[in-house]
Amino acid sequence: MDTEAIASEIVNLKNRIAELDEGSVEEKQKLHERLRSLQDRLSDRTPVDREPGPGSNEVQYIPPS
């Protein structure tokens, strides 16, 4: 899935969540989980279900090449 497709799905999920103001809690939870997964994928972060490794809070400087 490319970046544009992920971003488009994120927008669609946010719109659907906004439509479900008082809707199904279960559906909202599933949408939020999918949204979080896509945002992690887009930003290349550690997925929510994995524990960060030791020292993961440290900032690492990588000089430009």
Image (spheres, rainbow, N blue to C red):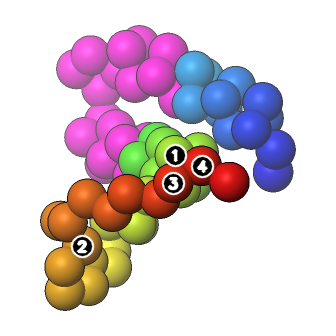
Specify the amino acid type for callout 2.
Answer: Ser
- Residue 9: image location, x then y, percent: 66, 32
Viewer-closest of 23 and 5: 5
Quarter location, residue 23: top left
- Which residue was labeled with disc 3? 63
Q: Earlier in the sequence, mark 2 or mark 1?
A: 1
CB atoms of marks 2 and 1 within 8 Å: no
- Residue 31: image location, x then y, percent: 44, 42
Residue 3 falls left or right of residue 59 = right
Q: What element does badge 3 sit on?
A: loop
- Which residue was labeled with disc 4? 64
User: Residue 59 bears which disc, if any?
Assistant: none
- Residue 6: image location, x then y, percent: 69, 38
Looking at the rendering, the stretch of residues picked out in magenta corresponds to: 13-34
- The residue shown at (25%, 59%) is 59
Specify the amino acid type for callout 3.
Answer: Pro
In the rendered image, residue 4 lying in the magenta stretch gets the answer no
- The residue shown at (22%, 20%) is 22
Does residue 55 lie above or below 13 as drawn? Answer: below
- Which residue was labeled with disc 2? 56
Viewer-closest of 46 and 48: 46
Q: Earlier in the sequence, mark 2 or mark 3?
A: 2
- Residue 13: image location, x then y, percent: 53, 29
On-image quarter of the C terminus: bottom right
Viewer-closest of 25 and 56: 56
Q: Earlier in the sequence, mark 4 or mark 2?
A: 2
Q: Residues within 10 Å of mark 2 (few under 14, many from 20)?
A: few
Does residue 32 lie above or below 19 as drawn? Answer: below
Q: Nearer the viewer, mark 3 or mark 1?
A: 3
Q: What element does badge 2 sit on?
A: loop
Residue 65 falls left or right of residue 16 = right
